């Protein structure tokens, strides 16, 4: 759906404008998402329906990914920063909420 690597500068443009407070972000399961109207789509044939599909997620697939991630991080034991453990827990909560 995304037109290609050359258009990734559009993402960077949105990130910079978001960090500068010029545009807002939407909280999503996997992070912050741009609003359709705030993203530079000039010259692209990308409608709202396609845009929305790009941000659809499979909660079961992400839950499995979290299992793998936590298994990987387990090797670090007590050396894993608590902040990472907290973020993983928050991510699990967002995934669970998306399943409802």
Image (cartoon, rainbow, N blue to C red):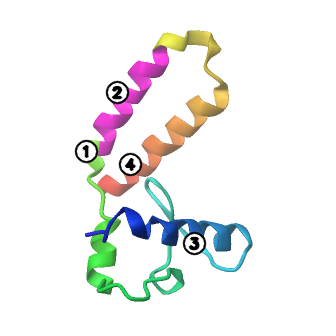
Q: Report which residue position mark 1 lands on.
A: 60
The residue lying at 50 percent from left, 80 percent from top is 39
Q: Report which residue position mark 4 lands on.
A: 95
Magenta-tinted stretch: 62-74
Mark found first going from the N terminus, 4 or 3 = 3
Query: Is the residue under label 1 in contact with that under label 2 (CB below 8 Å)?
Result: no
The residue lying at 64 percent from left, 79 percent from top is 23
- Cα separation between marks 2 and 3: 30 Å
Q: Nearer the viewer, mark 2 or mark 1?
A: 2
**The label number, if any, that marks residue 14 in the structure image:** 3
**The label number, if any, that marks residue 68 in the structure image:** 2
Mark found first going from the N terminus, 4 or 1 = 1
Mark found first going from the N terminus, 2 or 1 = 1
Crowding at mark 1 (Cα within 10 Å: few <14, some 14-19, many 20+): few
Q: Nearer the viewer, mark 2 or mark 3?
A: 3
Query: Is the residue under label 3 in contact with that under label 1 (CB below 8 Å)?
Result: no
- For residue 32, side relative to residue 54 (left or right): right
Q: Position of residue 13 (x, y in %)?
A: 58, 72
């Amino acid at each position: 759906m995304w037109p290609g690597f050359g258009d990734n500068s559009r993402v960077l443009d949105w990130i910079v404008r978001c960090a500068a407070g010029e545009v807002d972000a939407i909280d999503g399961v996997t992070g912050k998402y741009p609003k359709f109207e705030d993203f530079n789509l000039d010259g692209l044939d990308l409608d709202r329906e396609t845009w929305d599909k790009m941000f659809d997620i499979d909660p079961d697939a992400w839950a499995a990914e979290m299992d793998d991630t936590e298994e990987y991080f387990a090797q670090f034991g007590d050396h894993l920063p608590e902040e990472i453990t907290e973020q993983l827990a928050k991510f699990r909560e967002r995934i669970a909420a998306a399943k409802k």
